[in-house]
Each structure stands twice: as C-alpha cells, then as structure tokens.
C-alpha cells in the first residue's frame, strides 16, 4: 500500500488491524485508538481519499490502497491551515481525538469548501471528543473554511 | 508574540503551547511508548458479579508460544501486600491487586498474562480455566444500607462502609418552625467521563538495584507511589514513576492495582511490560461515578425562605475500598449550594455492592448534590407559586456576606451569586424565552426552561476524612513546582501535577514569564511528571480542580525565588542594590538605564561555572523549588465542621429544551452559562473547560448510564450502548463571565474544570421537568433518555 505517499510492503498476520499496522509496524503513532469498536473515530484515516476507521480494517484488506494519516496531513515545516485553525480556536484539550477530527475535517473541507455550522457538526458527529464539548472544534473548522 | 503593555501574561488568552504538537499527532501518549524487549499484558476478568474462585488452571496459557508468564491472585498474595483501604476496615481484608478466592464485580481481574504481543496475550488469557462457584450478588444499595442482602466481605459483617448522621445548627427547631416541608427522593445513575485514551502503564524491574520504574497515565502520582511502595514492599526511593501526555483524565485515570499487576509480571519476566485497557475493560472495570439515592427535606417559610435542610444519602460505591465515602464527604462540603440555610442534617451511607468500583469523576458527588438541591428548589418554587429565579434570589448568600462560612464548615471566599444568575438570565433572554414557551405550548409544542446554579469548589482537604476515621492521616491541598535557569540562560519549569488536557505547560509558562520578564514562548515547561526530577508531594496530582487554587502558588513561589536570586547575582556583579534592578527581555537591567544589564546567560555562567563570582554565601546553581498549601484548608473542629473542599467559584446555567412527544427525544435549543471563577489565568483555556464540562453534564442528563441487570452484568460496555454526546447532541454553548477574584489564591483565580458538570444535569432536568410539568410529570432521576420521556408523556396528553 501507499502510506502518506510512501510505498510500503510488509507481510502481516491476517488479523493485524490497520490501526496497529500503522502505529506499531510503521511507527505512525499520530493515529490514536480510542475504542476499537468503530464508534469513537480517534483512529480515522483516509483510505483512497475517504475517511475510514483504521480499527475496523485489517491491514491485509488495504493491499494496493492509498492511506493518509495525520502525519501525511502535516506539512514538513509548520502546520496546515486546518491545524493552525484548531490551535487558534483551541479546538482541542487533551489532543487524543484531534488527529481523527482533523482527518474528518480535512475530508469535509475537500468536499465542501464552505460548510455551515450544521454541516460541520454533521461531519464531526461520527467522532467523539470527551474534552471540548465540540464548540471550539466547530469554530476551528469554520475558521479554516474562512467563515 | 510581542510583550504585553501594562499587565502581564497571566490573564491573557495565550495560544496553548501543547496544541502545536497535538494537532500534528505529535503528542507522546502511553501507547506511543515502546521500550525495547517490551511484553504486552492481557487480563482475564471475572464474568460474575460475585463468586468464589474454586480453581484456576493456567497451564495451557503458560505453554502457549510467545507467553512469558501468567500471574494469578495466589501469586499476588505471595509477591505483594494487600492494597490498604483508605478507611480502616473492621477486620483485615485480603484485597490484593488480583482477586484472591472471591471475585466481587464483573470485570475484576483474576489473572494476567505477559506475552510478545497483545493478541498472543489475549489468546493465552482465553486458555486460562477458572472454576467459579457463583454467589448471590449485592446490587441494591438501599437494601444494603438496611442491612439486607449478600455480603461482599463476610468478615466485615456489613456492606456499609460508613454510616453517620451529622447535624449542624438547630435542625429540629427549623423544621418545627417551618410553614412547610418539601420532601423528595432523587436518584442518580452510574456514569463516567470516559477519557478518550484509556488507562494503563508500563512497568519495568531492575534486579541490579531492586528498583521498579513505571510509566503511566495515572492522575495522582503522589498517592499512587505510596501505595506501590507499601504493596510491593519496596522503599519509595527505589520507585520511579513518569507520566507522558495524558489523553484526558476527569478523575478516572487511576488504578494502582494495574500497576502492581504489571510490576509482578515485569519482575518475573525480567522484561518491561505494558498494559493498556481496551474500551470494554475501561467501561466495565475502571471507575464509575457512584450511583445513589438521596432523600431531601427542605423546611421553608411561606415567603420561600429556606430554614433547614435534611438529607439522607445512600452512595452505591460498587467494590470501592480505595476511596469509599469520598462522594459523601464532598457532597457534605457542598450541601447548601449557594444558599443561606442555617440548619443542616446529613445522614450518609457509603455502601459496597457487586459493581465496578466508584471513584473520582468530574465533580465527585457534586453533580448529584446539585441535581437534588436544584430540583428541590424548582419544585418548591412551583409549590409556592414563585418564579424559580425569585426563590433563588431570596435565599442566596449575598455578596456582602462574603467570605461566608456554611454550617458544615466550607468557606465561600468571594462571589456575587445573584449577579451571576441575573447575567445568565439576561444573556439567555429569560422573559422572551418564557413568552416563546407559552406560544409554543399553545401550538402543541413542548418547550421547557431549566435554570440551575451552583458553587464549584476547588482543592481537596483530606482532613475531612477525620469525620469518619477519627484520626488525621492526610490533610490540606498542596503542590510543588520547580523553576530553573539552565546554564545557557534558558528557563525551564516543572510541576507535580501532570495535566491531562488543561494546558498547564502554557499557564505555568505565563506565570513564570511574568515573574522573570520573559514571554511564555521563552519558558519550557516539562511534559508530564517524573518522580525523580519533578518536585512532588503525597498530595501531588491532577485532581480536585486544584491547579488554579494551589498549584499556581507553587509555580509563582519557585519563580520568585529564582527571580530574587537573579537579582542578587546581578546586583553583586553590577555593584548596585537589587531594588534598583528589574528583569526584562531575558536580562537583569538597571531601572532607568536598561542598557546597563546582565543577560540570564551571563548570570547563569556565574551561577554554574564561574562560581567565584557569586556573592558571599550564595549557593551555586540557579534553580528553586517551592511548595504551596492552600490557606483555606483547616482541620476538623469540635462540632465536626470541616471544609472538604476549598476555594469556591460559581455558575448559573440556563437551558431551553424542546421535547418531541412522538419519540421522547430531548433537544437542547439554547444553552447559556455564566460563570465566575475569579480571575481567569487564560480565558482561551477557561472557556474550553466550561464548554467541555457542560457537555459532560448534558451527557449525564440525557444519555449516559452504566446499566446492570439483575445478576450484576453490565449491559452498557461499549460506546454503542454507553452513549456519549456527539457534536449533534451538544449545542453551541454560550459562555459569559463575571470575575470576583478569590482573596485566598495568588492570582485571585478559582477552579473551573468541574463547573459545567455540576449544574449541567440539574439545568437540563429542570428544563425537561418544566416542559412536562403540566402533564403531571416530575423528574426525579437521571438519565432522561427518550424511552423514559416517551413513557412519561404517553397517555398523558
């Protein structure tokens, strides 16, 4: 598969989860695991451009796929505009849900450059944050969209 | 970032330092750490609420390739000592880190496996054969309080850990003189804040020095180190405990037993081991806010004046011997809420049941206390035909009465409770919302307005346990910090309180920057905690809202010691009085002649290298530690008055809900919070905390419940059935603020981490009740889920 633009080839156990593969085999620890049953969204990555729960996928299913993690959405120097917006709005506290939130927000903004607050909430509703009450996350995404 | 004008960095919405790494996924959380030769741990847990362990056969598990070793309760009983209960028990209990002979809740660890990876460890755990002899489970706390039901520990003769009646003032007289008494029974469910990162640890044993090292996301390293030393039989000097970035805490992140289990496995394996809960383990077995039942009797005069309060409170602790009665004591400290109630009686039961241990969860007991009081006040207003706002205004402790000591011994240090409520009502548009409600009802829609106000204390005073034990073991609220100018002149600070999302690296940097004439960016603050380098106390930790009221004193004290030393060194070298110098832009400068200066780098050279240049008698080096204790803590007095918590913030929540009678769904249309946490150290962080803790209150009110069946099986053990609020459930919470500084904290700041979680459930419940009261509905329990609402509404319209 291609991960963050790099070709990766590994032999893995059939039961290896994509989340474990990314974190443990590739050392991409920015993808976090919060529930391992597909509800919390902390482990969200992009698979062929669409958000997906890496805890619900097996690495072997991704043969030939393109995977993008938070590391792939972070510029070599500095932060992306979306990440800057999260920081400016303090759209996080403990930061554990944040990579998944940013992946989902990235996907939303790629699809809809000017989402309403309601559309932002709809898109984020698949990801849990236990710290912020979502208010500043919604603000951050709106700010990144220039609203 | 440019230097601020007149005032300092404290009080400004300085961007949060930690956020820069966290938005890039560059935090370092426990599971991101993988020491060499690491083994992974899986636990086998009890499937029964209560059973005798007849036999454990771990042979097949031990033989599985990849398994390093297996430990059971029998091993724990040989290699460790029992975990000492916080309240001494009537008979000694064999309460080890793994169950010995009996299991007492579903999810209690029975055995643990260390293997080359987690999957292999889980495979091995499944091969362990345990023979159980199931026992009847104690699940009804009220029955247990009456002395009925099966016993968790027959040696104790009772499941009641504590029962007592505390009376403050002339309660009988107040009730005799009253025009009326409102009596209600309220219930709260078990719920938890469920930090998104689960709890765990890495443990390593060094046989060369007989020493253990732990990396853990434990919130109270000071207390945990004491337990580890005692249970492992190792001096504290041979223990090291580090905390990395912590992915949320809210009180939940603590279980010394898991660290002990890992210590035993690491010692046997001769390799480091890591355990991290999966979500089911977290929801089933880590920590729940205690459920409970509270009877409230409120004596009042016909004009609405509150004369007396009598509370009977049964707290369902689950299998919690580590911190029983904690909920009770904290409720006692908060029992009067913001009201002037001269006579108070509190009858408390702390009761063990065969459920997950209860423990610290955002607000500890206060959300229930506030729910009961604010529901009672709302019901009393309805009985008297008064607006609930008016009833509150008649009974608040007034701003002219501050500082005010409550009958139970809490001191409300400052604040203007009527002003907080009025500001919230204005922002909410109370009169307009009432009109909206009336119009909607005419159109057949169910709108309700809920108001709840609360006090929010910060800092724990463990001296309150003397009410129960009759002796003082720990007391007060204290924390330690260190500030150091490194040999290259750069500044570093550390604190004994490991944050879990509260931005302490930023706020500590703001405080130090002001003292040393720097910008926050120029101050490096250590991530997390390391018992070998961070200054710390037994009381150290991330709990009880204490940063703003206790930790700040430690940081500013250490920074001032370093500041004074910098000034002394510069004064000596420049041959000028320290008073004629100031610290600005990384240098000690002569007032009025700023070009005459010595940089921190130059002063550090004197302190660390060219020590012959030091003033006579001055110690080499340029660092200082300081520990601060909150001045409001005091011991119990002869009338059993004691503040269980200290500095008091306050808040008013106003909430508008609409109820869909067809589905029972409650939608929050508008939510306004006005809060007063004294001086805000960083308004950006404070506002985020208010949003987040209010969301916890909303979750507890409408969604979250750990539900057990009649056999003590937990029915809600995943996020698919234990429902957390999503971005579609939490409204755009509007926040306003007042600032009445505390006279008792270094910057006038107060705690703010729990303020939304305390009145949130009450505000939502009052709104639902207000929407449905005309149908004869009275809200007496939580959570208010759609099925509950639907049943209330069905057939009554």
Image (tube, grey):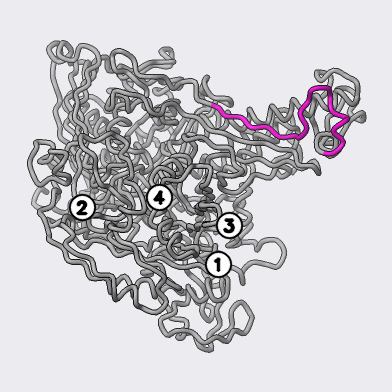
Task: Report, in whole angstroms, how far the alpha carbon at label 2 lies from the one at label 4.
Answer: 40 Å
**Residue under circle 3?**
B22
Residue B642 seen in this snapshot: yes
**Residue under circle 4?**
B731
Have a look at marks 1 and 2 and say if they share a chain. Answer: no
Q: Secondary structure at mark 3?
A: helix
- Name the image quarter holding residue B590: top right
Is residue A84 covered in magenta?
Answer: no
Task: Report, in whole angstroms, how far the alpha carbon at label 3 lies from the one at label 2.
Answer: 39 Å
Q: Are marks 3 and 4 in contact (CB under 8 Å)?
A: no
Place of residue A58 in the rendered image (x, y in percent of width and height, measured from the top left)? 43, 81
Is residue B610 covered in magenta?
Answer: yes
Task: Report, in whole angstroms, how far the alpha carbon at label 4 lies from the one at label 1.
Answer: 32 Å
**Letter of the chain that mark 4 sits on in the rendering:** B
The residue at the far front in this view is B208
Residues drawn in magenta: B609-628
Q: Nearer the viewer, residue B311 or A129?
A: B311
Q: Nearer the viewer, residue B540 or B415?
A: B540
Left-right relation of B670 to B74: right
Left-right relation of B165 to A146: left
Numbered disc in front, either 3 or 1: 1
Residue pictured at 50% horizontal, 52% vertical: B212
Q: Secondary structure at mark 1?
A: loop
Numbered disc in front, either 2 or 4: 2
**Letter of the chain that mark 1 sits on in the rendering:** A
Place of residue A126 in the rendered image (x, y in percent of width and height, measured from the top left)? 41, 65
Left-right relation of B381 to A14: left
Residue B394 seen in this snapshot: no
Task: Say above or below: B282 vs B478.
Answer: below
Checking the image for residue B104, the label placed there is: 2
**Residue under circle 1?**
A29
Task: Report, in whole angstroms, how far the alpha carbon at label 1 lies from the one at label 2.
Answer: 37 Å
């Amino acid at each position: 598969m291609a991960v963050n633009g790099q070709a990766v080839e590994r032999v893995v156990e059939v039961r290896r989860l994509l989340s474990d593969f990314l974190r443990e085999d590739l050392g991409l620890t920015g993808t976090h695991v919060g529930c391992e049953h597909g509800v919390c969204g902390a482990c969200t990555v992009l698979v062929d451009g669409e958000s997906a729960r890496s805890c619900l996928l097996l690495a072997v299913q991704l043969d030939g796929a393109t995977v993008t993690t938070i590391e792939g959405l972070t510029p070599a120097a500095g932060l992306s505009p979306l990440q800057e917006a999260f920081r400016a709005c303090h759209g996080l506290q403990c930061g554990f849900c944040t990579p998944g939130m940013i992946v989902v927000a990235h996907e939303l903004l790629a699809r809809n450059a000017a989402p309403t607050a309601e559309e932002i909430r709809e898109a984020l509703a698949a990801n849990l944050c236990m710290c912020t009450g979502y208010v500043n996350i919604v603000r951050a995404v709106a700010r990144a969209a220039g609203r | 970032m440019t230097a601020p004008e007149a005032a300092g960095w404290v009080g400004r919405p300085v961007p949060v330092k930690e956020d820069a790494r966290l938005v890039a996924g560059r935090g370092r959380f426990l599971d991101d750490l993988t020491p060499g030769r690491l083994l992974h741990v899986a636990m086998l847990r009890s499937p029964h609420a209560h059973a005798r362990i007849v036999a454990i056969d771990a042979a097949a598990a031990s033989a599985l390739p990849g398994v390093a070793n297996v430990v059971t309760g029998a091993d724990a009983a040989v290699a460790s000592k029992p975990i000492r209960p916080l309240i001494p028990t009537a008979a000694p209990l064999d309460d080890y880190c793994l169950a010995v002979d009996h299991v007492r809740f579903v999810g209690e660890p029975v055995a643990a496996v260390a293997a080359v990876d987690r999957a292999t460890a889980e495979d091995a755990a499944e091969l362990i054969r345990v023979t159980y002899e199931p026992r009847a489970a104690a699940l009804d706390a009220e029955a247990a309080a009456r002395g009925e039901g099966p016993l968790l520990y027959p040696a104790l003769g009772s499941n009641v850990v504590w029962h007592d009646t505390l009376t403050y003032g002339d309660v009988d007289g107040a009730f005799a003189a009253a025009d009326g008494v409102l009596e209600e029974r309220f219930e709260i469910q078990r719920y938890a804040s469920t930090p998104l990162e689960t709890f765990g640890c890495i443990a390593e044993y060094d046989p060369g020095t007989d020493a253990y090292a732990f990396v853990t996301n434990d919130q109270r390293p000071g207390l945990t180190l004491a337990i580890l030393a005692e249970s492992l039989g190792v001096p504290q000097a041979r223990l090291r405990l580090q905390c990395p970035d912590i992915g949320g805490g809210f009180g939940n992140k603590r279980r010394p037993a898991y660290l002990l289990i890992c210590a035993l496995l690491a010692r046997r394996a001769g390799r480091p081991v890591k355990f991290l809960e999966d979500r089911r383990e977290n929801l089933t077995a880590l920590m729940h806010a205690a459920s409970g039942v509270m009877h409230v009797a409120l004596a009042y005069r016909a004009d609405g004046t509150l004369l007396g309060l009598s509370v009977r409170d049964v707290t369902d602790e689950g299998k919690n011997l580590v911190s029983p009665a904690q909920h009770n004591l904290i409720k006692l400290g908060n029992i009067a809420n913001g009201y002037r109630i001269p006579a108070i009686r509190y009858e408390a039961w702390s009761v063990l049941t065969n459920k997950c241990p209860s423990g610290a969860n955002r607000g500890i007991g206060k959300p229930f206390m506030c729910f009961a009081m604010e529901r009672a006040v709302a019901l009393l207003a309805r009985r008297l035909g008064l607006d609930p706002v008016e009833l509150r205004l008649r009974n608040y402790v007034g701003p002219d009465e501050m500082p005010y000591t409550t009958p139970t011994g809490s001191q409300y240090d400052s604040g203007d409770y009527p002003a907080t409520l009025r500001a919230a009502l204005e922002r909410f548009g109370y009169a307009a919302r009432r009109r909206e409600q009336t119009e909607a009802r005419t159109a057949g829609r169910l709108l309700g307005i809920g108001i709840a106000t609360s006090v929010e204390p910060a800092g724990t005073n463990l001296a309150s346990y003397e009410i129960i034990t009759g002796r003082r073991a720990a007391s007060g609220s204290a924390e330690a910090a260190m500030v150091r100018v490194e040999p290259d002149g750069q500044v570093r600070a550390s604190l004994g309180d490991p944050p879990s999302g509260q931005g302490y690296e930023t706020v500590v940097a703001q405080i130090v920057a002001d003292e040393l004439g720097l910008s926050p960016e120029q101050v490096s603050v250590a991530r997390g905690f390391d018992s070998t380098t961070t200054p710390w106390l037994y009381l150290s930790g991330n709990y009880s809202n204490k940063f703003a009221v206790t930790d700040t004193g430690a940081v500013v004290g250490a920074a001032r010691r370093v500041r004074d030393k910098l000034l002394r060194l510069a004064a000596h070298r420049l041959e000028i009085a320290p008073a004629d110098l100031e610290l600005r832009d990384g240098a000690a400068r002569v007032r009025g002649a700023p070009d005459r200066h010595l940089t921190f780098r130059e002063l550090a050279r004197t302190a660390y290298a060219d020590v012959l240049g030091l003033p006579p008698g001055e110690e080499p080096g340029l660092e200082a530690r300081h520990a601060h204790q909150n001045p409001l803590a005091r011991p119990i007095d002869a009338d059993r008055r004691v503040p269980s918590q200290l500095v008091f913030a306050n808040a008013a929540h106003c909430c508008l809900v609409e109820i869909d009678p067809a589905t029972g769904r409650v939608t929050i249309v508008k939510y306004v919070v006005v809060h007063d946490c004294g001086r805000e150290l960083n308004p950006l962080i404070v506002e985020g905390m208010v949003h987040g803790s209010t969301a916890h209150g909303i979750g507890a009110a409408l969604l979250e419940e750990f539900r057990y069946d009649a056999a003590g099986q937990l029915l809600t053990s995943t996020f698919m059935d234990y429902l957390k609020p999503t971005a579609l459930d939490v409204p755009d919470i509007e926040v306003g603020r007042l600032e009445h500084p505390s006279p008792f904290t270094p910057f006038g700041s107060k705690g703010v981490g729990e303020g939304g979680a305390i009145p949130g459930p009450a505000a939502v419940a009052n709104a639902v009740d207000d929407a449905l009261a005309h149908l004869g509905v009275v809200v007496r329990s939580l959570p208010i889920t759609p099925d509950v609402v639907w049943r209330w509404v069905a057939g009554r319209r």
